[in-house]
Amino acid sequence: MRIDPRMLRTCLGHFATGVTVVSCDTGDAPHGATVNSFTAVSLEPPLVLVALDRRTRLAGYMEGRPFTVNVLGSRQGGVARHFAGTAMAADSVAWERPDLDLAPRLAGALATISCRPWHVYDGGDHRLFLGEVAHFDVHGGEPLVFYRGRLGPLGPAHQAAPWLESGDGPELSWFPFSA
Ligand SMILES: Cc1cc2nc3c(=O)[nH]c(=O)nc-3n(C[C@H](O)[C@H](O)[C@H](O)COP(=O)(O)O)c2cc1C
């Protein structure tokens, strides 16, 4: 089968994801880019992954630097567009920097996951950045979803019954956010 990159992209777009802005320092101002390739990798050690197009500025800045994954909420579609290259008013983006050893984070995100660089792998025209989680915060709320090229709220699926055997629910004792 000959793989047409555009058709493959359309096919992959049927996999619904959340939306993040991945941020890091540049030595000057903070830099962020919209990323939906964020994946949880390991709990012990705590590792996460993002796949970045080699042509993005973020991929260059992230070499050897800490980064933060900012999980966007359903009302942050404008923020996602801004960090995907559609500039919007600068005052709608506010950076926070609670720890100078870690990357800046976005105010108003559903959750932030701050990482130290762990390893970078070759991923074809992308680079695969693994980070070791050094700090995380959960603020909660409804997530922003990316599906077939569109950004929107999760909708009724949000209220669906959890799959108890998923190993990912708050009813399990090891779940990181259970009370
Ligand atoms: C919903 C969405 C998800 C995206 N996910 C990724 C991604 O996972 N990896 C990537 O390299 N670019 C992704 N992009 C594209 C980047 O956000 C875009 O190329 C950005 O302008 C890069 O910024 P920079 O070159 O200033 O770092 C995504 C864009 C959108 C709108």
Image (cartoon, rainbow, N blue to C red):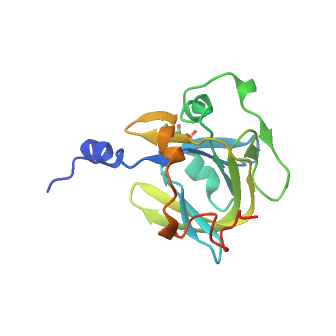
Q: Is residue 5 above or below residue 134?
A: above
With 126 as the anchor, is 48 left or right in this view?
right
With 138 as the anchor, is 167 left or right in this view?
left
Image location of residue 22, percent across then percent down: 62, 48
Q: Is residue 6 above or below residue 77?
A: below
Image location of residue 92, percent across then percent down: 72, 27
* Residue at (53% x, 70% y) in the render: 167
Which image quadrant: the C terminus? bottom right
Q: How many marks?
A: 0
With 55 as the anchor, is 5 left or right in this view?
left
Q: Nearer the viewer, residue 148 or 155?
A: 155
Q: Is residue 168 above or below residue 156?
A: below
Does the image show residue 52? yes
For the view shown, which residue lies furthest in the top direction?
89
For the view shown, which residue lies furthest in the front direction?
161
* Quadrant in the picture for residue 77: top right
Image location of residue 90, percent across then percent down: 71, 25
For the view shown, which residue lies furthest in the bottom direction?
44
* Quadrant in the picture for residue 95: top right
Q: Is residue 122 above or below residue 60?
A: below
Q: Nearer the viewer, residue 55 or 20?
A: 20
